[in-house]
Image (spheres, grey):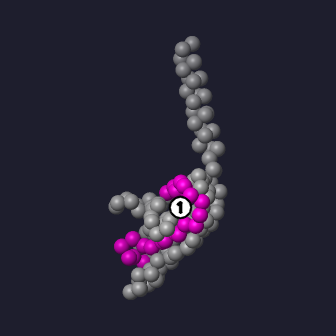
Amino acid sequence: MRKILFLFIVFISVQLISKESYSQKDIFIKEFQFELKKISDNQYENEYFLTVTLNKNSLYKFTVLNHIGDFPGNAIIEILENDKIVATNYVGSKYYERFLFKCTKTGFYDVLIHYEDNKLGSSLIKLFLVQ
């Protein structure tokens, strides 16, 4: 009887955990492609810059698909609020193809994209709202 009760509790726990993970969904907001086929002496020409509006208390997910067209570079994404980096996918020497950003203030955020170690690259970046 104890064994059956234990298995029942484990089964219910797994079901609850599964439901929680399935209830979270990503809503696609925007995608942008950045391609750098030639390194310029002007550093600003080696970056992609755009502005997005994000909402307070919302969780956003950024995903990066690199090496489109066989380019070697990994796109580094920096989210800036008033020229201060508030999120990035490159921390220390660790690179992430997915990262989350919890917005603490509604407003305009600058997104700066460039390639690691000034390599050439072609990448597709997608922005999702996580609910």
**Tag 1: Cα neighbours inside 10 Å, few (<14), some, or many (≥20)?**
some
Q: Position of residue 107 (x, y in %)?
A: 59, 64
Task: Identify which residue is drawn at 54% across, 14% down.
Answer: 2
Which of these two is toward me, 50 or 93? 50
Which of these two is toward me, 26 or 109? 109
Which of these two is toward me, 92 or 8? 92
Q: Secondary structure at mark 1?
A: strand
Task: Identify which residue is drawn at 53% across, 17% down.
Answer: 3
Total marks in image: 1
Task: Identify which residue is drawn at 49% across, 57% down.
Answer: 99
Q: Quadrant of residue 117?
A: bottom left
Q: Specify whether residue 112 is painted magenta.
A: yes
Q: Examine the rendered structure and indicate whether residue 1 appears above or below residue 38.
A: above
Q: Position of residue 116 (x, y in %)?
A: 39, 71
Which of these two is toward me, 53 or 127? 53
Q: Examine the rendered structure and indicate whether residue 7 appears above or below residue 80.
A: above
Q: Examine the rendered structure and indicate whether residue 41 appears above or below residue 120.
A: below
Asked whether residue 86 is in view, the answer is: yes
Q: Specify whether residue 49 is painted magenta.
A: no
Task: Identify which residue is drawn at 64% across, 44% down.
Answer: 23
The residue that disc 1 covers is: 63
Q: Examine the rendered structure and indicate whether residue 64 appears above or below residue 122.
A: above
Identity, as a three-letter code, of the amino acid under mark 1: Thr
Q: Which residues are magenta?
A: 99-120
Asked whether residue 66 is in view, the answer is: no
Q: Position of residue 126 (x, y in %)?
A: 57, 64
Q: Quadrant of the N terminus?
A: top right
The answer to whether 109 appears left or right of 78 in the picture is right
